[in-house]
Amino acid sequence: MDLEARLEDASTSHSAHPQELRLWLRMLTCTQLIEKFVRTQLRKEFGTTLPRFDLMSQLERSPVGLKMNELSRRMMVTSGNITGIADQLTAEGLVERVPLADDRRAFLIRLTKAGRAQFALMAKAHEQWIVDALAGLSESQSKQLHTLMGHIKQQFKQAQAA
């Protein structure tokens, strides 16, 4: 029995909202399956990890670089996690630390030329993995699912703003 089925059995037997719980568990399971697939592909094809890919993705979006605390905030992990990944990528010549003129204690992290080239290869492959992972949906199903997930996202944004 897979995780989704085990959790569904445990959570819906005492709930007045079993459909909502089944939906949540289905979304969670799908997310975990896709993430596991992406992690495996990154390791197999590029010898890297999802956190490294995520950090490089953030830096690719900010060519001038980002401070460690901004990277930490964007990736929703501790600065300690970012430091370890940044150290590895720096040692490999994929990112560089750039001192800030106005604060000698702080620096920016940014992709090097080699880092940009490596990330471009990974991003192209990542895009194709996601396309392949969702290829079983028709275009209309994909649009409908996107719309429905957008409603859920909006609901949470409104709840957080209140």
Image (cartoon, rainbow, N blue to C red):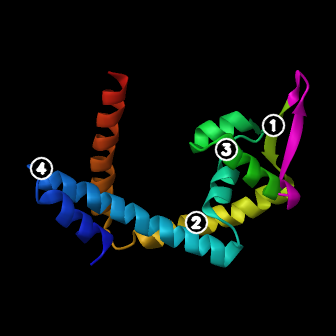
| Residue 113 pos. (x, y %) | 85, 55
- Name the residue at 14% across, 55% down: 19
Q: Are marks 1 and 2 in contact (CB under 8 Å)?
A: no
| 104 sits to left or right of 131 | right
74 is within the stretch colored magenta: no
Label 4 sits on residue: 17
Q: Is the C terminus in the top left, top right, bottom left or bottom right quadrant?
A: top left
User: How far apart are labels 1 and 4 at the CA level?
Assistant: 48 Å
Secondary element type, mark 1: strand
| Residue 157 pos. (x, y %) | 36, 32
Q: Earlier in the sequence, mark 3 or mark 2?
A: 3
Q: Is the N terminus in the top left, top right, bottom left or bottom right quadrant?
A: bottom left
- Name the residue at 68% across, 41% down: 79
Disc 1 vs disc 2: which is toward the camera?
A: 1
Q: Earlier in the sequence, mark 1 or mark 2?
A: 1
| 158 sits to left or right of 93 | left
- Name the residue at 11% across, 52% down: 15
Foreground pick, 87 / 137? 87
- Name the residue at 79% across, 37% down: 64
Query: For the residue carrying disc 4, how many other residues have a C-alpha within 10 Å: few (<14), some (14-19), or many (20+)?
Result: few
Secondary element type, mark 3: helix
User: How far apart are labels 3 and 1 at the CA level?
Assistant: 14 Å
Amino acid carrying label 3: it is Arg
Residue range corresponding to the magenta coloring: 90-105
Amino acid carrying label 2: it is His
Label 3 sits on residue: 61
Amino acid carrying label 1: it is Leu
Q: Is residue 159 above or below residue 118?
A: above
Disc 2 vs disc 4: which is toward the camera?
A: 4
